[in-house]
Image: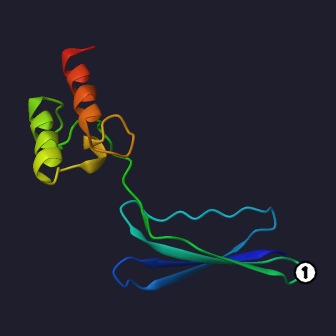
Amino acid sequence: MQWACWNITEAGGGEEVYHFVDVTGNSSTFSPTSGSSGYFDMSIVDEMGREGYYASPVFNIITDQRDPGDANDDGLIDIMDLVAIIDHIVYGSPVASELNADANQDNVIDIMDLVWIIDAIVGA
């Protein structure tokens, strides 16, 4: 039998949680809860006793709730979302939802997100 140990630590000095799993089929799944962040270590031992180790960078798990363009997170895509993104770009003001403000999903909040939202508003 092969086994793996997931050592999961929540961000902010949270308690470490260990998960031991059988990976005889050469796979194991790490499924942190939505909204959590932290890092994990994984140790693997195969049937011959050989060991492997992996340490992750810090991860942030975001919720599946996504409404591209709704930067102010009010449930609407409208001019107020454009204002929120302009304030963010020009003044560095925080947006209510960075995930939604990145409307075109390129991992950057910029003028292209404004274009995407304008297209959404006018129905292009």
Question: Taking the image as drawn, is residue 23 in sight?
Answer: yes
Residue that extends furthest to the front in the rendered view of this protein:
90
Query: Which quadrant of the structure image shows residue 65?
Result: top left
| Mark 1, other Cα within 10 Å: few <14 / some 14–19 / many ≥20 | few
Left or right of 28 in this view: 25:
right
Label 1, on which residue?
48
Total count of labels: 1
Decide which of 48, 84 is in the foreground and name it: 84
- Work out whether 49 lies above or below 95: below
Q: Which residue does the image show at 10% across and 45% down from the upper left?
A: 87
| Residue 80 point in image, percent of width and height | 9, 35
In the rendered view, would you say 74 is above or below 15? Answer: above
Coloring scheme used: rainbow
Residue 107, x across and y down, in percent:
37, 46
The amino acid type of the residue labelled 1 equals Met
How far across and down, in percent of the image, does residue 55 sit?
58, 76
Q: Quadrant of residue 42?
A: bottom right
- Where residue 41 sits: x, y (%)? 58, 77
Front-lying residue, 4 or 83: 83
Q: Residue at x 81, y 67 (%)?
A: 24
Q: Is residue 72 visible?
A: no
Q: Residue at x 32, y 42 (%)?
A: 66
Image quadrant where one finds the N terminus: bottom right
Residue at horizontal 43 percent and vertical 64 percent from the top: 33
Q: Quadrant of the C terminus?
A: top left
The answer to which of 87 and 73 lies nearer the viewer is: 87
